[in-house]
Image: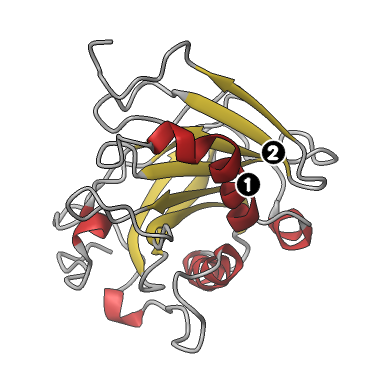
Amino acid sequence: MRNPNREATLSPPERIAIALVFLVAIGVAVVVVSRLGAPEGDVVGPPDQRPMVADSVPRPVPLIEGFEVAHEWAREWDREAWLILVSTQFEYHVDEGELPSEADQGMFIFTFAAPKDGDTWRRLTLAVSRQSGVIYFEDEFASEVAPPDSIEQLLRDLPVTAEQAFRLAEEVVGEAYRDGCEQHRRAVQVILDSTDRDNPMWVVVYYDQRERNTNDIVMRIDAITGATTSEERDDPSCDMDA
């Protein structure tokens, strides 16, 4: 089904095109082509029929609440759909160089798989706003590569949440990395690496928005213990010519 109507209530930060959730050391990548405002975007139903996070849930929306809404909608797409990828973008709204105390903007990206159909497995990617709790992007595609098993229960049971991993990374490297360069370093990606189900990791990626193809800092946080390791560029200077 094709629907030319897209959400018209997004804030400017939410209208940032969803492009590449960065390739990190563990090889996790989620490629989402932005079709916000475009008529050719495939959707599974009218936007006004999609579920959204309840008003009683605090904003910014917690990851698990965003997942519940995405999961409900994915089951409308295919009743046997299962979760295979999770990513979060935490973003600060920088006003005249002033950085707020909380990264209350950004999105969750969830990718679901459906049972094999012929020679392919369908995938559905959904983006949920951390501010509004609305599903404002969806994209369906098919792949000949078999998807991994569901990570739903793993996500639900993790002792360290995405929000906790983000706050920890901010304390260790993020605040210093952003200091004096707030306008260009306001967004952070947090990706769940579930390659080893017994040792899941949150991969926190810092980058300068003027140079999106380069990851300046990649921090891995054990999703069970909270232990951290990090990698970073020799000189992540705010001066791009440095």
How far apart are the alpha carbons under marks 1 and 2?
A: 9 Å
User: Dot 1: within a 10 Å radius of its alpha carbon, few (fewer than 14), some, or many (20 or more) residues?
Assistant: some
Residue tagged by mark 1? 168
Quadrant the C terminus occupies: top left
Apparent side of residue 174 relative to residue 91 in the rendered image (left or right)? right
Q: Which of 135 and 116 lies nearest the eye of the viewer?
A: 135
Which residue is most to the right?
Answer: 198
Q: Is residue 28 above or below residue 164?
A: above
Quadrant the N terminus occupies: bottom left
Question: Within the image, what quadrant is residue 133 found in?
Answer: bottom left
Q: Position of residue 81 (x, y in %)?
A: 59, 60
Question: Within the image, what quadrant is residue 206 found in?
Answer: top left
Label 1 with label 2: CB-CB less than 8 Å: yes
Q: What is the number of callouts on the image?
A: 2
Residue tagged by mark 2? 221
Question: Within the image, what quadrant is residue 3 found in?
Answer: bottom left
Q: Is residue 130 above or below residue 175?
A: below
Task: Check disc 2 and give the amino acid type.
Answer: Ile
Apparent side of residue 176 relative to residue 180 in the rendered image (left or right)? right
Q: Residue at x 64, y 55 (%)?
A: 164
Asked which secondary structure carries label 1, the reply is: helix
Q: Residue at x 49, y 48 (%)?
A: 123
Q: Position of residue 175 (x, y in %)?
A: 47, 41
Q: Mark 1 or 2 closer to N-term? A: 1
Asked which secondary structure carries label 2, the reply is: strand
User: Dot 2: within a 10 Å radius of its alpha carbon, few (fewer than 14), some, or many (20 or more) residues?
Assistant: many
Q: Report whether residue 117 is seen.
A: no
Mark 1 or mark 2, whichever is nearer to me: 1
Q: Is residue 242 above or below residue 52?
A: above
